[in-house]
């Protein structure tokens, strides 16, 4: 079907979608365009499930640990721990305030998606403000012993790395100090970090149980000053990194600094050693890069302008800037790394021109000789298509939705026809999808 972008937005539904159609038990009922056919006799309701949305369900890895990872997904308020070995998902007792929302046309979340659940270990952090601000540290999906870390008065929660809780004083835009909180036998140890600027917007980024990358931004009128630091969580030592970097990320044994069309890879265990230079002149400034073992991997962002709303290829990149190997045909830009150096990404092995992708979580592991192993850890459920129109006549339910195609400025979806049994107990007989619509 052809539809303008603004017209599509006005018809978006919220919540879980299903089409409920009341059909008369007696045959011979006339057509209706309201989605309901009513006869003089009592009726029954059949639920016709929609097709899968063309754009995959949005997900986010919140914490990649040693044995599994914590994830949240669009249309759901659950937090789930997924085991690497079996793919089994276990829901945490804690839930999000409401189901998460995603804008497939903009390629980004609607509203704020969750953070603060920990990094780099099987320890999951759950922050609560009641009865007083505190962080509960649990293992994986919970059920065992927990540790409570109270947030001192005058401090606010930032993140957790391993079992170390990071807090700030001041506001995020004007932080006066960052603190490391650790639960010990005689109480909570509070260590203020030294060597970070005051009054800057300081944020904790990539990290694990060993160290964390801190970024600082200061705006003075129209001038922006940028800074990066690596914090050792055991000692609290702060080391300044290249202030001109546009991105800094960690691997098991590496630190990657991305700059203007070039990058440097440092030995994370010896930052004084000479770095390895990487050529990025062939790649976009907003491409996402990460180290997988000693190899650079990268994926381009979603680019709605060319109707690619589902993802791009994930590549391994050579030091001289060539695309050395395709690792995944379609991938999301969220490249999350685990303590063993493996990388998690949502994606699909095959790209289709029509219909949904076989979306799932993949884990990439690099061997000592540089070879990369890919394993599909778990499936990601399809997102139900959004209906934009409905008609019912002669026992055939037709819906216009965004299941078959998604090109918001030209074509969106197609027409889905479902043949229904109209005598006796109502039920689906068969379903077809008609081209572009």
Image (cartoon, rainbow, N blue to C red):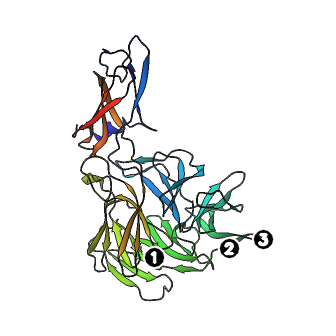
Evaluate if marks 3 and 2 touch, with contact meaning CB atoms under 8 Å apart. Answer: no
Position in image of residue 148 (x %, y %): 70, 61
On screen, residue 324 versus residue 210, left or right, reads left
Tag 1–tag 2 contact (CB < 8 Å): no
> Residue 41 versus residue 59: which sits nearer the camera?
41
Q: Nearer the viewer, residue 429 or 277?
A: 429
Q: Residue at x 42, y 76 (%)?
A: 256
For label 1, count other residues whose C-alpha is less than 10 Å away and answer few (under 14), some (14-19) or many (20+).
some
Residue marked by disc 3: 186
> Which quadrant of the structure image shows residue 135?
bottom right
Could you tell me how far apart the alpha carbons at marks 3 and 2 are, in whole angstroms? 15 Å
Residue ranking furthest to the right: 186
Q: Quadrant of residue 361?
A: bottom left
Q: Is residue 216 visible?
A: yes
The residue at the point 41 percent across, 12 percent down is 41
Q: Quadrant of residue 30?
A: top left
Q: Which residue is mark 2?
A: 191
> Helix or strand or loop: what does disc 1 sit on?
loop
């Amino acid at each position: 079907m052809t539809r303008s972008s603004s017209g599509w937005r006005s018809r978006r539904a919220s919540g879980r979608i299903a089409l409920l159609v009341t059909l008369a038990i007696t045959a011979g009922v006339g057509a209706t365009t309201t989605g309901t056919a009513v006869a003089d006799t009592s009726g029954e309701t059949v639920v016709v499930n929609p097709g899968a949305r063309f754009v995959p369900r949005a997900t986010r890895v919140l914490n990649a640990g040693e044995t599994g990872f914590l994830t949240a997904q669009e249309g759901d308020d659950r937090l789930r721990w997924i085991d690497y070995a079996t793919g089994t998902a276990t829901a945490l007792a804690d839930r999000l305030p409401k189901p998460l929302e995603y804008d497939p046309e903009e390629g980004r979340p609607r509203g704020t998606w969750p953070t603060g659940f920990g990094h780099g270990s099987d320890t999951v952090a759950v922050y609560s403000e009641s009865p007083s601000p505190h962080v509960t540290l649990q293992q994986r999906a919970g059920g065992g012993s927990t540790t409570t870390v109270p947030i001192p008065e005058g401090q606010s929660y930032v993140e957790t790395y391993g079992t170390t809780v990071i807090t700030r004083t001041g506001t995020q835009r004007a932080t006066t100090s960052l603190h490391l909180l650790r639960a010990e036998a005689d109480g909570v140890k509070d260590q203020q970090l030294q060597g970070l600027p005051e009054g800057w917007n300081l944020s904790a980024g990539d990290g694990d149980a060993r160290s964390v990358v801190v970024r600082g931004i200061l705006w003075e009128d129209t001038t922006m000053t940028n800074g990066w630091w690596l914090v050792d969580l055991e000692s609290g030592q702060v080391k300044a990194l290249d202030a001109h970097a546009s991105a800094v990320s960690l691997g098991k044994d590496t630190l990657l600094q991305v700059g203007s069309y070039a990058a440097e890879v440092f030995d994370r265990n010896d930052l004084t050693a000479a770095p390895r230079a990487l050529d990025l002149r062939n790649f976009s400034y907003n491409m996402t890069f990460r180290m997988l073992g000693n190899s650079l991997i990268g994926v381009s962002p979603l680019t709605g302008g060319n109707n690619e709303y589902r993802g791009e290829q994930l590549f391994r990149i050579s030091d001289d800037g060539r695309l050395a190997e395709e690792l995944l045909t379609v991938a999301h830009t969220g490249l999350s790394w685990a303590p063993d150096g493996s990388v998690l990404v949502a994606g699909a092995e095959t790209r289709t021109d029509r219909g949904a992708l076989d979306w799932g979580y993949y884990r990439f592991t690099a061997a000592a000789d540089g070879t990369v192993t890919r394993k599909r850890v778990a499936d990601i459920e399809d997102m139900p298509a959004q209906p934009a129109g409905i008609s019912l006549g002669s026992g055939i339910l037709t819906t216009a939705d965004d299941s078959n195609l998604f090109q918001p400025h030209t074509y969106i979806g197609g027409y889905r026809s479902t043949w229904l049994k109209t005598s006796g107990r109502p039920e689906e007989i068969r379903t077809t999808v008609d081209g572009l619509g």
